[in-house]
Image (cartoon, grey):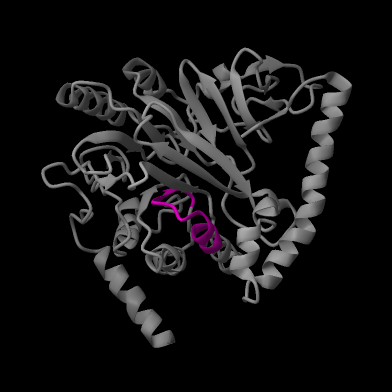
Amino acid sequence: MKKTFRAILSLILCLTLIAGVVSFAAAEGDPLTARAFRFGSDGRFKILHVTDTHLHEDNVEDSTRLIALACDAEQPDLVMLTGDLAPEDTLEATAARVDQLMRVFESRDIPVAVAFGNHDSENGAYTREQVMALYNAYSCSVSVDDGDLLNGCGTYRVPLMSSDGENLVFNLWVFDSGDYDGEGHYANVAEDQVEWYREASAAIEREEGKKIYSLAFQHIIVPEIYDALEEHDYWTAYSYEHIYHEGEYYRFSKKNTNYGMLCEYPCPGYYNHGQFAAMVGRGDVLAMFTGHDHTNAFGVKYQGVDIVNSLSTRYNGDAFSTQYGYRVIELDENAPDKYETRVVRWYDFVNRKDVKALSAGSADKNLLAQIRFQGFFRKFATSLGVLIVKVTTGRTVRYPD
């Protein structure tokens, strides 16, 4: 088995050395479009948002088992991976973690679209293009390496066609939000990526004769998140200091529609290259989904677009990580101007009847029992904190997801 595994890794690593690797999934004639999907016969399309898995030797087995159970329970049509997935020190070690993750989806025939995060190639031992080749070595990957066309690696769109395959109903925009700028701050989607989106969105509207609604996926949240919150003083519970402005603290604003819970300060890029403004101007993006900030599972409707953050999808074996989990996004081809979403935390997931049925008598029994035990205390502490703030101040800090 070890020899076979080494042979597989060697093959994958060889593929990364091939110049000009382009995803098999890219639509003919359009290198920045992945292969199209159809809505199901019931008119629905389900996306499982998995982000910030940070797979390493000490957490990969538990994390991938939980992700596998989530796939079995949710039965998604597509998995969106939005960065910081398997950032090991060498390409060979990263390939091993990618293999452990992608085999979950490959064995279930679930398509996967990848966007990268700030950690995915930060140590300089390998490039984003090499890592994208690792993912695209699996038949379930629909990810696109945009080559030299745009900044970064992995900016593209995924078309969703009607259930009969006749009409374009929806778009998924995938962006590489970069890693760090020249000054060491977090990066953001670059100008050429913004212009590509703006031009592609307008071209699709002209071709279809109407706006095609969409969702956007990337790792790093947009700077406008702080405009969507409100500044308050330090002593306010569940307010968080601005990542770049010392002494400024922010919390949910009652002026906006809020979802979920803010548990740490958001970490956008330092400079703003106009991505959010372009999407507001085009009017076709319903929501932007990001990861990066591991404990944040929230959304804010701002200028007509939902800015949404999803939890880290890993389990590190402690009570704290029982609050991590995943997000589900569901679309209806008969109502393309809307979407539904819900957050599932591990401490809730393991108590679902369908999960108990899936894991009964299996090797996952001890893992799920551990999460139930530790998760009880984590959930109790979180709920108690939310209740105390509500009773003492009247302020809501946790909204329905």
Residue 297 is situated, as x and y percent measured from the top left of the image, at 61, 38
Magenta stretch in the rendered image? 68-84
Residue 265 is situated, as x and y percent measured from the top left of the image, at 64, 31
Judge by depth and name the residue closer to the eye, 391 or 151: 391
Judge by depth and name the residue closer to the eye, 69 or 89: 69
Rendered residue at 84%/38% (across/down): 384
Above or below for 264 versus 363: above
Above or below for 9 versus 325: below
Rendered residue at 26%/25% (across/down): 195
Position of the N terminus by quadrant? bottom left
Residue 268 is situated, as x and y percent measured from the top left of the image, at 51, 31
Queried whether the magenta region covers residue 73, the answer comes back as: yes
Rendered residue at 40%/69% (across/down): 107
Q: Is residue 34 left or right of residue 255?
A: left
Q: Is residue 315 left or right of residue 232?
A: left
Q: Is residue 383 visible?
A: yes
Above or below for 227 versus 83: above
Residue sitting farthest toward the top: 255
Queried whether the magenta region covers residue 206, the answer comes back as: no
Position of the C terminus by quadrant? top right
Image quarter for residue 260? Answer: top right
